[in-house]
Image (tube, rainbow, N blue to C red):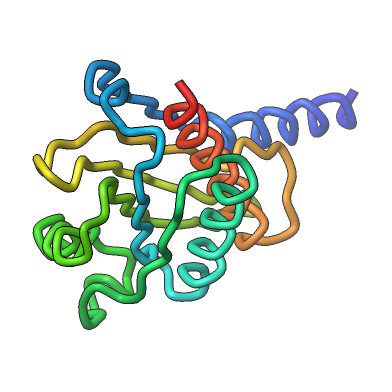
């Protein structure tokens, strides 16, 4: 009987670790106006410095393998303050929009990755915001947890979350 209670407790802990909300918000009228040959500018992701480079590379490679648009991968938008290193907010959108406008890109993609590890549970998160460079309007935003029931590292969780937001982005761009 004790083994059944322990197994039940472990199962509940695993399920709670995955009970994080997802956000999938696409402004369909704006998404429909994206030109089929739009140049997409992906800024370097922000957030946990252990994951930003790999996350940006992975997200960009997933887009490149699924859509035919030209994708430009950017570098750091600003010096990373202690707020950013601690997982603070994204860089101000105005900085990224100015860079994108100066280079005549059509779509701006900004991302952030975070993770947590508590009492044996792991999770990773990816947040994506997509903007029309000309108008500055946000077309879509996505936030996804990893969705993994079990994982071996925070890195694995973050990459799973990035995979999910890349799928959301591809779906939106393929409409």
Q: Is residue 49 left or right of 106 when viewed as pictured?
A: right
The residue sitting at 54% across, 47% down in the picture is 63
Q: Is residue 11 above or below residue 83?
A: above
Work out whether residue 82 or residue 103 is closer to the camera in this orientation and state it: 103
Give how far across and how far down residue 144 sits, in percent. 47, 37
Q: Can see residue 122?
A: no
Work out whether residue 34 or residue 169 is closer to the camera in this orientation and state it: 34
Work out whether residue 3 or residue 43 is closer to the camera in this orientation and state it: 43
Which picture quadrant has residue 129?
A: top left
Looking at the rendered structure, the number of numbered marks drawn on it comes to 0
Residue lying furthest front = 37
Give how far across and how far down residue 142 sits, in percent. 38, 35
Give how far across and how far down residue 30 sits, in percent. 23, 24
Give how far across and how far down residue 131 sits, in percent. 23, 42
Q: Is residue 27 above or below residue 72?
A: above
Q: Can see residue 7?
A: yes
Question: Where, quadrant-wise, is the N terminus in this rendering?
Answer: top right
Q: Is residue 163 left or right of 34 when viewed as pictured?
A: right
The residue sitting at 46% across, 68% down in the picture is 52
Which picture quadrant has residue 140?
A: top left
Question: Where, quadrant-wise, is the C terminus in this rendering?
Answer: top left
The residue sitting at 24% across, 32% down in the picture is 139
């Amino acid at each position: 009987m004790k083994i059944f209670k322990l197994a039940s407790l472990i199962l509940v802990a695993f399920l709670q670790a995955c009970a994080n909300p997802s956000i999938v918000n696409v402004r369909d009228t704006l998404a429909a106006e994206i030109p089929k040959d739009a140049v997409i500018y992906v800024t370097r992701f922000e957030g946990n410095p252990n994951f930003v480079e790999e996350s940006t590379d992975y997200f960009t490679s997933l887009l490149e393998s699924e859509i035919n648009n030209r994708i430009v991968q950017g570098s750091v938008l600003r010096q990373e303050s202690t707020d950013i290193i601690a997982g603070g907010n994204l860089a101000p959108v105005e900085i990224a929009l100015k860079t994108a406008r100066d280079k005549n890109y059509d779509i701006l993609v900004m991302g952030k990755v975070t993770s947590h590890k508590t009492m044996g549970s792991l999770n990773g998160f990816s947040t994506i915001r997509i903007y029309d460079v000309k108008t500055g309007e946000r077309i879509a935003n996505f936030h996804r947890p990893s969705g993994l029931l079990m994982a071996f590292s925070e890195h694995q969780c973050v990459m799973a979350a990035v995979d999910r937001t890349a799928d959301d982005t591809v779906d939106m761009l393929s409409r």
